[in-house]
Amino acid sequence: MSKWFKEFRLTDQPSCRLFCFPYACGGASLFRHWPRLLPADMDVLGMQAPGRECRYQEPPVASLTEKVAILRREIDKYLDVPSVFVGHSSGALVAFELLRSLDHAAKRCVKAIVISAKRAPHLPRIRGPIHDLPFDELLQKLRTMDSIPGELLEDRALMQLFTPLIRADFALSETYRFIAAPKERTKAVLFWGRDDLDVSRQSMLEWQRHFSQEIELHAFDGPHLFIRTHHDQFVERLGSILKPLLHSPELA
């Protein structure tokens, strides 16, 4: 068992094991209902990074390089069956860099990566950094974005409590510097929200530059956090896409 992965379902003979990576400031609880909506032979594990939920007393990790290095060690014990990485927003960047960090044998276990609501990593940023802004300016900027649940933004006391986590999670993406590498051979499936204010369809299609197989882009009604606002539809569609994909001869 790893503190970094919450095990929502582990079966004796899984068809695959889903590793799920939440958006900025999100925790593993985002995925707690996924098992009831996915085929019974799919394991579900959610990343539980420090600074949130049951690990709220631990300092959050603000470096993507550091987080990926830790995850690389923690995930090794689970990569004994066909696996899929699923990441939403900044979680997609974590999943992608974790995939790139794996050695050849481990990569062979990862049959697909699902990238949801994240611009391709080589594209220039469309917003300036916010992680080091004074509190009131940070709050004002966050209100113009679609990256933090609205109920949290409206609670000033809670926002002050969560500010260290918010700063760390945004710093993780804002200090990230993409380094070119050979294309990944893993199958990439992309989800995009038609009402996303920051992530365009073209910015999702740019992910093709980083994968040798043709990517699949699935449009989804909803804003940036459609993984929350359209939770059941998202998970059910994910399962319907993954089930035939995992039995494809190309991925055997």
Image (cartoon, grey):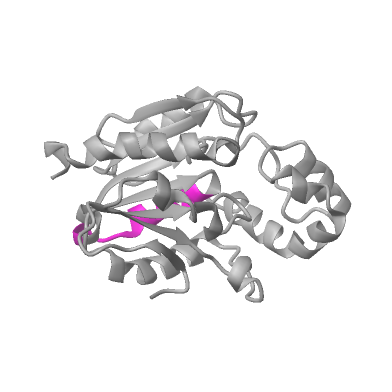
Image coordinates of residue 234 in percent, x first then y, are 47, 36
Q: Residue at x 41, y 49 (%)?
A: 36
Quarter occupied by the C terminus: top left
Q: Main secondary structure of the magenta part?
A: helix
Q: Residue at x 50, y 44 (%)?
A: 88
Toward which corner of the image does residue 144 lie, by quadrant? top right
Image coordinates of residue 1 in percent, x first then y, are 38, 75
* Direction from residue 142 to residue 238 in the image, left or right: left
Q: Residue at x 80, y 59 (%)?
A: 158
Image coordinates of residue 80 in percent, x first then y, are 22, 64
In terms of depth relative to the viewer, which is nearer, 226 or 79? 226
User: In the rendered image, is residue 140 in sight?
Assistant: yes
Question: In the picture shown, does residue 3 fall above or below 170?
Answer: below
Q: Residue at x 35, y 31 (%)?
A: 208
Q: Is residue 240 magenta?
A: no
Toward which corner of the image does residue 247 lie, by quadrant? top left
Q: Which residues are magenta?
A: 91-105
Image coordinates of residue 104 in percent, x first then y, are 21, 58
In terms of depth relative to the viewer, which is nearer, 78 or 42? 42
Toward which corner of the image does residue 12 lie, by quadrant? bottom left
Number of numbered discs present? 0
In terms of depth relative to the viewer, which is nearer, 234 or 131? 234
Question: In the picture shown, does residue 29 fall above or below 178?
Answer: below
User: In the rendered image, is residue 179 in sight?
Assistant: no
Q: Is residue 95 magenta?
A: yes
* Direction from residue 156 to residue 6 in the image, left or right: left
